[in-house]
């Protein structure tokens, strides 16, 4: 009998047979006491009596699957006789019970990055029914927001839930899985449950460093504590695995200051100098507290902005410039250069001229300077004989705010050029005038005839003079001291010699090219010394020719003559064969009177000669 039978349902019972008839036959039926059934006896008269089993209470197989009853048939005799039969009622199962999970909420844990196939748990459910009605099938109820079927799988028969995909704590820290179980009855009955999977974090994520704000470049005069950047450290792990610490690796004038949790400020922690270090690559390392600890590094580039804290610098505090005289006007005589350790406009230098403090020469009247290039340009041609040196200052100023400057002293030295010819001094005049000297016929070899003196307005080698006899060619009676200008006889006179000897003296300087001057002297041979004196007495002297220069020359001649005499006596006593060069070494560059009254005594200038005159001198 199915447990789903309705109340009042009747079921015929077996009919009892009695061999007696009439009153002694079966008259009624009786059912043993029970709570489910009653007996409906139907009397058809003398023919037969039947009985039906009437359901009075809903059957429930899960409570009582088998009902044992006793049916008794009673006849009408007195005493009555009975016959019994055992009724075994099997209650047939109906799918009237839903499956039931063992727990309303299952909780479990899984380590992130668990391998595929890892078992989480096994669901258990029961169904009071039997047979197909009790055969259960497990499944996920729905995907939900966690997409459970992508991460997990369930065995429909056993209810075992295993890992199917990648489990990432940073993606989901927990999964809520909706599950269901159904039986195979018709129609099937369902039950739902919930599984909460907690993901256990593994330290599989290194900290991440990000710069949220950056002030770059930072000025080199930034004060200590100036914020340069804001840094955020994030770690997707949880617990200790997500706790981080950050620090700077290496030496740098910066420090990290923790603001809140994983937020840091990068601050200036020392003096900055762009000229020393213009850019810093700051290495920052962040490490978590996991086991094992994971770390990451990042390099923050901080550029240092220039501040005008360096004035222009010249290579030397004093610069010496050497300029040839007679240089062209407008030529660049020197280019000043300076260096500024700053950059951009702070290193852009302009030059200006400051007047000199020496020689009372206004620098602006002599030179000019290009403010951009530092080229020093001459405004006039220089003459060594008028201006040998002058000094001025140049100021270099940068374009910073405020501007910085420095000065350099410039000394200009004018270099002499051979632009002046030698000048013949009195009493002789240059070529074209008649000059005469007399010598006695008895003059010995080495007799002093005359001394030619000349000066050159140039200096150095350009003023180094040499004297040469150029005419007459082949003359072997006279010679001249190359450096002294003294004309002397080379030998005694002979009867074959002329009574008058025209001499041309060439005075050359040592410049390149060499410049020269000439003077002509007629040397007249007389019979006696008295004639020479008479000739001297008849030399007219112009009263107006005596000048201050002559006075100075006269004083100098007297002084030099005294010194010369003393020196000559000493030298003769020590060394009688003193050479002519030794004699000339102690002479002064002035005209003086020879001790024997024969002529002037010279002071040597040099042994340098011009080429053509030297050739003639060697031949002589």
Image: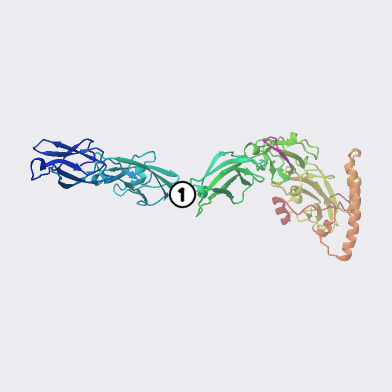
Q: Secondary structure at mark 1?
A: loop
Check the image and tell me how it is coloured: rainbow
Name the foreground residue: 335 vs 170.
Answer: 170
Name the foreground residue: 365 vs 262.
Answer: 262
Left or right? Give the position of 383 relative to 41: right
Where the N terminus falls, by quadrant?
top left
Q: Which residues are magenta?
A: 396-408
Q: How many marks?
A: 1
Give the quadrant of residue 55.
top left
Residue at 27% x, 43% y is 183
Where the C terminus falls, by quadrant?
bottom right
Left or right? Give the position of 150 relative to 565: left
Residue 430 in picture, x, y percent from top left: 79, 43
Q: Residue furthest front?
A: 78
Name the foreground residue: 174 vs 262.
Answer: 174
Residue at 75% x, 39% y is 393
Residue 251 in picture, x, y percent from top left: 61, 51
Residue 399 located within the stretch drawn in magenta: yes
Give the quadrant of residue 32.
top left
Residue 54 in picture, x, y percent from top left: 20, 38
Residue 76 located within the stretch drawn in magenta: no
Left or right? Give the position of 38 relative to 204: left
Q: Is residue 502 visible?
A: yes
For disc 1, the marked residue is 201
Residue 170 in picture, x, y percent from top left: 45, 45
Left or right? Give the position of 544 relative to 3: right
Name the foreground residue: 189 vs 64.
Answer: 64
Q: Is residue 595 visible?
A: no
Classify 10 Å Cα crowding around label 1: few (below 14), some (14-19), many (20 and above).
many
């Amino acid at each position: 009998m199915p447990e789903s039978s309705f109340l009042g349902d009747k079921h015929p019972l077996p009919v009892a047979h009695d061999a007696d008839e009439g009153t002694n036959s079966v008259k009624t039926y009786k059912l043993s006491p029970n709570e489910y059934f009653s007996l409906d006896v139907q009397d058809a008269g003398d023919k037969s009596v039947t009985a039906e089993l009437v359901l009075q209470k809903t059957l429930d197989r899960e409570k009582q699957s088998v009902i044992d009853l006793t049916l008794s048939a009673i006849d009408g005799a007195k005493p009555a006789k009975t016959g019994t039969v055992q009724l075994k009622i099997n209650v047939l199962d109906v799918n009237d019970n839903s499956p039931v999970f063992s727990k309303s909420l299952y909780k479990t844990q899984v380590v992130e990055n668990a391998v595929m196939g890892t078992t989480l748990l096994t669901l258990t459910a029961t169904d009071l029914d039997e047979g197909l009605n009790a055969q259960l099938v497990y499944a996920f109820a729905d995907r939900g927001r966690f997409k459970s079927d992508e991460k997990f799988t369930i065995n429909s028969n056993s209810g075992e839930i295993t890992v199917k995909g990648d489990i990432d704590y940073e993606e989901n820290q927990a999964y809520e899985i909706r599950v269901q179980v159904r039986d195979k009855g018709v129609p099937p009955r369902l039950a739902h449950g919930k599984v909460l999977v907690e993901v256990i974090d593994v330290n599989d994520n290194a900290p991440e460093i990000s710069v949220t704000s950056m002030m770059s470049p930072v000025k080199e005069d930034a004060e200590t504590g100036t914020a340069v950047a804001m840094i955020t450290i994030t770690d997707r792990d949880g617990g200790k695995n997500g706790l981080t610490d950050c620090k700077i690796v290496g030496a740098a004038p910066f420090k990290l200051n923790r603001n809140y949790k994983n937020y840091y400020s990068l601050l200036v922690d020392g003096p900055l100098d762009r000229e020393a270090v213009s850019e810093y690559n700051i290495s920052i390392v962040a490490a978590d507290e996991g086991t094992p600890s994971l770390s990451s590094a990042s390099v923050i580039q901080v550029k240092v902005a220039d501040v005008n804290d360096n004035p222009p610098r010249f290579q030397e505090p004093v610069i010496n410039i050497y300029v040839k005289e007679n240089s062209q006007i407008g030529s660049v005589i020197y280019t000043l250069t300076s260096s500024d350790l700053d950059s951009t406009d702070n290193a852009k230098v302009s030059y200006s001229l400051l007047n000199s403090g020496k020689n009372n020469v206004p620098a602006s009247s002599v030179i000019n300077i290009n403010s951009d290039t530092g080229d020093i340009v001459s405004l006039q041609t220089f003459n060594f004989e008028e201006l040998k040196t002058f000094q001025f200052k140049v100021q270099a100023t940068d374009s910073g705010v405020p501007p910085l400057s420095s000065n350099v002293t410039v000394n200009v030295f004018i270099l002499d050029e051979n632009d002046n010819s030698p000048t013949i001094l009195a009493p002789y005049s240059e070529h074209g005038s008649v000059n005469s000297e007399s010598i006695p016929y008895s003059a010995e070899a080495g007799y002093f005839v005359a001394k030619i003196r000349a000066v050159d307005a140039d200096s150095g080698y350009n003023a180094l003079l040499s004297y040469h006899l150029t005419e007459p060619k082949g003359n072997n009676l006279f010679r001249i001291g190359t450096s002294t200008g003294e004309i002397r006889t080379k030998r005694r006179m002979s009867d074959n010699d002329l009574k008058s000897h025209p001499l041309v003296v060439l005075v050359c300087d040592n410049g390149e090219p060499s410049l020269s001057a000439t003077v002509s002297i007629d040397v007249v041979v007389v019979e006696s010394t008295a004639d020479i004196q008479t000739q001297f007495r008849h030399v007219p002297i112009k009263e107006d020719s005596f000048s201050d220069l002559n006075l100075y020359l006269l004083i100098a001649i007297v002084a030099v003559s005294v010194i010369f005499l003393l020196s000559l006596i000493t030298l003769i006593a020590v060394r009688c064969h003193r050479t002519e060069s030794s004699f000339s070494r102690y002479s002064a560059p002035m005209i003086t009177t020879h001790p024997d009254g024969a002529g002037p005594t010279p002071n040597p200038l040099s042994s340098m000669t011009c080429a053509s005159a030297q050739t003639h001198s060697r031949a002589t």
